[in-house]
């Protein structure tokens, strides 16, 4: 019997113990790297990364993380591949699986990711779809806990578009057992199916259109772009989201020692002000750095090393 392939696709697909294991490993790998004692756990292994959408953090942190672990990477854009001329995802998956030991995909289509998983014979990592961004959440939880201790029992307020990152926060709230209050304009809330899943799981996830109510007494305030990559060109969203901007007045509703997180890229003056993202409560830069360490933990899990 062949061992089950270790795909990293979404936080809701894991149990808490496995997620905790990945996080603990990420923390250990970070400490080892800082001490100059990193191990070449993935010597001789390779990762192909397909970017159907732009990326700075995901691309660089996976590439550098793989190299830290002694592995190699190939970065692919559909315009440079036969994928861009109509070769199927299924055929691409089968061919890449003969060359590399793992594949990461960033795409606007969760269905394409599923198709890749169906045909790949090596681990597949979700590098963001229109529905979720699980790698980001591993770094986000790691960052919160690094600064404020265990996240279980804490209150996280999401303020803005109920997008892919918000969906992964819902998954994380259930698996890591914290309260998540989503403040979103009514037309831009997360999918009802997702909220129902959280409820069925016994999660503490609520949705309001009142940002002040969501932020009141929160330990962590999170936001993201008003126009995600899968909504490029949809300017109508901006007007709906103006009341959800995280500025100093909004942060004042949260606990005085609340932290601010943003997956980046930030759109300064839209979803967040300079004063907040550059202010003393912001952990955005540690959060970006932790993508590197969290991805190393994810890779170590995928390769079972
Ligand atoms: N946060 C994030 O995924 O950033 P990139 O789009 O730059 O990869
Ligand atoms: N919600 C954003 C996240 C970018 C990392 C997007 O999908 O564009």
Image (tube, rainbow, N blue to C red):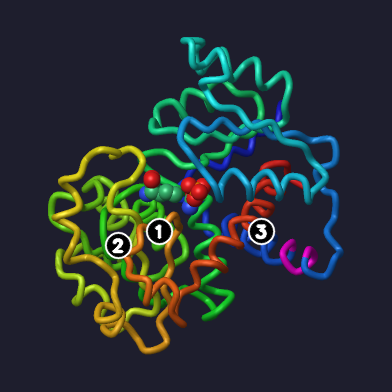
194 falls in the magenta region: no
**Apparent side of residue 11 relative to residue 238 in the rendered image (left or right):** right
**Apparent side of residue 240 relative to residue 109 in the rendered image (left or right):** left
- Image quadrant where one finds the N terminus: top right
The residue under the point 24% across, 73% down is: 214
In the picture, the disc for residue 271 is: 2
Viewer-closest of 293 and 54: 54
- Indicate the secondary structure of the residue bearing disc 3: helix
Residue 262 image point, x, y percent: 42, 63
- Residue annotated with mark 1: 266
**Apparent side of residue 27 relative to residue 11 in the rendered image (left or right):** right
In which quarter of the view is residue 268 placed? bottom left
Q: Is residue 21 above or below residue 81?
A: below
CA neighbours of label 2 inside 10 A, class few (<14), some (14 to 19), many (20+): many
Do the CB atoms of the residues marked 1 and 2 lie less than 8 Å apart?
yes
Q: Is residue 139 above or below residue 258?
A: above
Is most of the magenta stretch helix, strand or loop? helix
Q: How many marks?
A: 3
The residue under the point 49% across, 67% down is: 284
Q: Earlier in the sequence, mark 3 or mark 1?
A: 1
Q: In front of the other: label 3 or label 1? A: 1
In the picture, the disc for residue 293 is: 3
């Amino acid at each position: 019997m062949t061992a089950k392939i270790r795909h990293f696709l979404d936080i809701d697909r894991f149990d808490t113990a496995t997620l905790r294991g990945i996080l603990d490993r990420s923390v250990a790998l970070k400490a080892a790297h800082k001490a100059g004692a990193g191990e070449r756990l993935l010597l001789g292994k390779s990762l192909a990364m397909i970017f159907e959408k732009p990326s700075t953090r995901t691309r660089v942190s996976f590439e550098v993380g793989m190299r830290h672990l002694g592995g190699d990477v190939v970065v692919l854009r559909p315009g440079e591949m036969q994928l861009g001329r109509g070769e199927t995802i299924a055929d691409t998956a089968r061919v890449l699986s003969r060359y590399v030991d793992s594949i990461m995909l960033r795409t606007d289509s969760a269905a394409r990711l599923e198709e890749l998983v169906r045909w790949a014979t090596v681990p597949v990592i979700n590098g963001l779809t229109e529905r979720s961004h699980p790698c980001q959440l591993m770094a986000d939880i790691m960052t919160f806990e690094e600064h404020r201790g265990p996240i279980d029992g804490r209150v996280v307020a999401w303020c803005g578009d109920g997008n892919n990152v918000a969906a992964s926060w819902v998954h994380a709230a259930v698996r890591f057992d914290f309260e998540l209050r989503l403040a979103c304009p009514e037309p831009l809330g997360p999918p009802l199916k997702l909220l129902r899943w959280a409820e069925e799981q016994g999660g503490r996830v609520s949705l309001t259109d009142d940002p002040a109510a969501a932020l009141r007494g929160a330990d962590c305030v999170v936001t993201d772009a008003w126009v995600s990559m899968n909504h490029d060109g949809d300017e109508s969203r901006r007007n709906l989201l103006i009341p959800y901007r995280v500025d100093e007045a909004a942060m004042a509703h949260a606990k005085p020692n609340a932290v601010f997180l943003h997956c980046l890229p930030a759109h300064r003056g839209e979803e967040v002000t300079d004063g907040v993202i550059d202010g003393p409560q912001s952990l955005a830069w540690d959060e970006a750095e932790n993508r590197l360490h969290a991805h190393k933990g994810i890779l170590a899990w995928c390769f079972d090393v």
